[in-house]
Amino acid sequence: MLDVHPAHHAANTWRDFFIHIATIVVGLLIAVGIEQTVEYFHHRHQLRELREQMHDVLEKNRDSTPHNMEMAARLRASLQSIQARIAAGSAQPAPAPTIPAVDLFPRVPSIAPYEAAKENGTVALLTSEEIRIYNRLALQRDFLLLDVRDLNESFRDLDSFEERFADSAANRVFAGARPNLDIAKLSSTQREQYAILVANVIKRLDILRERIDLFDREGRAVLNGLRDESELLSTSPR
């Protein structure tokens, strides 16, 4: 707070009065100037820190992408093996248990510094173009989380179907490796239902893989110095 002290003695002349007024005004201007200077450098520090934090988190997101894509490919191959068993009936032996779904995405991409900046108001220190770019990344991450949710729901549907024929406390959403079904014991209608559920999981997985790839490409573009939202939009596959 600014603390302006009155004169220690009364002003006896107009000259003394104006001197006191000028002293107070100059003191206020100096105090406000110092305060604004301190705030300016503080904001510069906050802005630099926010940009550095976003750079670091986008780098970590990029490092996790190869792992996620590799696990997605392995899981897709496992689901395709189930499709092959359904199509062949009892002609093919049961493979090993499928890869648990939770192993696929233990590293969901983050934009935590930007979310924190929106909460504490420091997001206003960014340029308008930077805010639009980070909003774009935030939107893609929201879509990605929805795609993860949809994939988990399709896994739950698949687990529920299998539970009718093979009792197990394990579930794929929480890293459970469920036992394989004996396809020969399923009726033609049940095999068709099973095939639809497996195909739904594969489709959800493919959508999520595209979303991960898109988020990764947009994050890389920002790391490479992109500063225009229209250029960021051009990174979309379609």
Image (cartoon, helix red, strand yellow):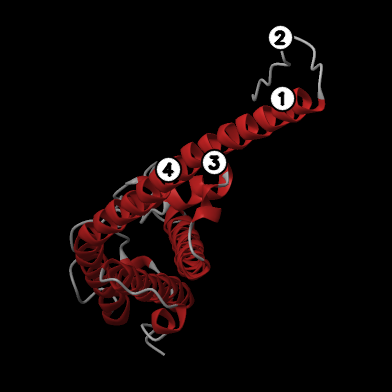
In this rendering, the label closer to the viewer, 3 or 1? 1
Percent across and percent down for residue 126 are: 48, 58
- Give the CA distance from mark 1 to mark 2: 10 Å
Question: Which of the 4 image quarters holds residue 216?
Answer: bottom left
- Give the CA distance from mark 2 to mark 4: 35 Å
For marks 2 and 3, the one nearer the N-term is 2
Number of numbered labels in the structure image: 4
- Give the CA distance from mark 2 to mark 3: 29 Å
Q: Amino acid at mark 2?
A: His
Residue at coordinates 29% horizontally, 57% vertically from top-left? 61
For marks 2 and 4, the one nearer the N-term is 2
**Quadrant that contains the C terminus:** bottom left
For marks 1 and 4, the one nearer the N-term is 1
Residue placed under numbered mark 3 in the picture? 36
Who is closer to the viewer here, 136 or 120?
120
Residue 91, compared with residue 123, is above or below; it is below
Percent across and percent down for residue 120 are: 56, 42
In this rendering, the label closer to the viewer, 2 or 3? 2
Q: Amino acid at mark 4?
A: Phe
Residue lying furthest top = 8
Q: Amino acid at mark 1?
A: His
Mark 2 burial class by Cα count in 10 Å: few <14, some 14-19, many 20+: few
Residue placed under numbered mark 4 in the picture? 41
The reply to whether residue 129 is in sight is: yes
Residues at circles 3 and 1 in contact by the CB criterion of under 8 Å:
no
Mark 1 burial class by Cα count in 10 Å: few <14, some 14-19, many 20+: some
For marks 3 and 1, the one nearer the N-term is 1
